[in-house]
């Protein structure tokens, strides 16, 4: 295998693990192809969910049809970067390890978008994808899954996937011609409301569960903006906003003292106006609206950034640039909860 080759994710949701040794026995349902997300989630209690973070087992996720760059492979694992998840950990994209079975080289894959003129992106929380020619079993895809569009049928559309030609309900997708249309801040919040009550999942970046920064990253990507993946990096880019001049759609960042006494950013939420934010709080809790006044977050609020207003709006989805803007803001290293 080429030591630096482009691959496509060929499962509904693929975990990007800290190392090949990170997964536990109970994580086996999401190490295979196809993955069994529901089985995995149902098997984890709150303690097992928290271990994903406290033991630094997994960092992020990639969705069906997304590109990853494979740097190395051995013993059924690939060391990869995810180019469209910008990270200060690696300028090439978010780094980590992914199961080889959950990737397919573009040269052999059936879902490469080379020459693709139109795309279909899942805008509902979930959508069933079934094979158009019996090449694969039907699977449940997540919000934000984006695949090359082949044809528009009556009630379905035909898409190309890494598994072969697939069919998906037209009501579940939105079409675009190379880049999702850029949406307003109020539209971004409206998209987020579809996930109210969804349990928090560390590393989550799908409708099966989000962490705090994965939630805002997914919403902004669906809205046509490519922002960094983790809260610490999201706070270093965008347009700085005074805390007494917040607008709907601004990202709010929260810091807490660590064991060494240093303050570090540990959380991000989406400002909705009227002193409220929409966020994915922490393990054991679910996506919710939260009124800042009188909450623990009021004292922890430390910064705000705006990503929907020029001239410092993020790149459109089509861009793969990973350079980081210098905003002059100094942030501490990543902590356990900076997603």
Image (cartoon, grey):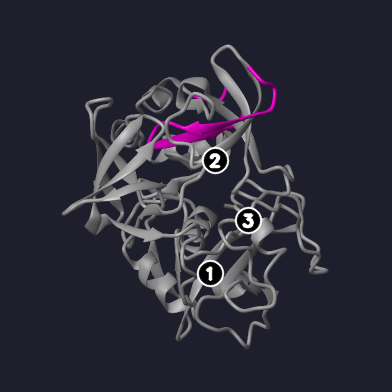
Does residue 316 show up?
Answer: yes
Spot occupied by residue 6 in the image (x, y as percentages of width and height) = 60, 32
Q: Nearer the viewer, mark 2 or mark 3?
A: 3
Pick whichever of labels 2 and 3 is earlier in the sequence. Answer: 2
Which residue in the protein does label 1 denote?
296
> Does residue 314 sit above or below 201 in this rendering?
below
Kindly report the distance in space between the C-alpha atoms of the residues bearing marks 3 and 1: 37 Å
Which residue in the protein does label 2 denote?
53
**Which segment did they paint magenta?**
1-23
Q: Nearer the viewer, mark 1 or mark 2?
A: 2
| Residue 21 is one of the magenta-drawn residues | yes
The image quadrant of residue 76 is top right
Kindly report the distance in space between the C-alpha atoms of the residues bearing marks 2 and 3: 30 Å
Pick whichever of labels 1 and 2 is earlier in the sequence. Answer: 2
Which residue in the protein does label 3 denote?
319
> Does residue 223 sit above or below 286 in this rendering?
below
> 71 and 263: which one is in front?
71
């Amino acid at each position: 295998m080429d030591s630096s080759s482009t691959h496509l994710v060929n499962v509904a949701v693929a975990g990007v693990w800290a190392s090949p040794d990170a997964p536990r026995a109970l994580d086996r349902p999401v190490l295979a192809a196809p993955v069994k997300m529901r089985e995995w989630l149902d098997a984890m209690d709150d303690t097992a969910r928290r271990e994903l973070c406290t033991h630094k087992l997994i960092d992020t996720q990639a969705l069906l049809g997304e590109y990853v760059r494979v740097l190395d492979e051995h013993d059924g694992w690939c060391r990869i970067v995810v180019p469209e998840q910008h990270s200060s950990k690696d300028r090439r994209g978010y780094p980590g390890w992914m199961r080889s079975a959950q990737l397919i080289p573009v040269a052999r894959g059936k879902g490469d978008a080379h020459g693709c003129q139109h795309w279909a992106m899942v805008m509902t929380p979930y959508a069933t994808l079934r094979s158009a020619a019996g090449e694969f079993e039907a699977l449940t895809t997540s919000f934000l899954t984006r695949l090359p569009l082949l044809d528009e049928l009556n009630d379905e559309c035909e898409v190309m996937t890494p598994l072969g030609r697939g069919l998906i309900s037209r009501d579940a997708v939105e079409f675009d011609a190379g880049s999702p249309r850029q949406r307003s801040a109020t539209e971004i919040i409206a998209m987020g409301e579809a996930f109210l009550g969804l349990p928090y999942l560390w590393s989550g970046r799908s409708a099966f569960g989000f962490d705090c920064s994965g939630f805002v990253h997914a919403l902004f990507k669906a809205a046509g903006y490519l922002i960094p993946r983790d809260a610490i990096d999201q706070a270093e880019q965008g347009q700085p906003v005074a805390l007494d001049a917040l607008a709907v759609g601004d990202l709010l960042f929260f810091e807490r003292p660590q064991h060494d006494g240093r303050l570090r950013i540990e959380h991000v939420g989406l400002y909705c106006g009227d002193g409220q934010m929409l966020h994915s709080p922490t393990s054991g809790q679910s996506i919710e609206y939260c009124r800042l006044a009188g909450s623990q977050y009021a004292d922890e609020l430390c910064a705000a950034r705006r990503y929907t207003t020029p001239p410092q709006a993020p790149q459109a989805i089509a861009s793969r640039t990973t350079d980081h803007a210098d905003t002059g803001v100094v942030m501490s290293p990543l902590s356990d909860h900076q997603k």
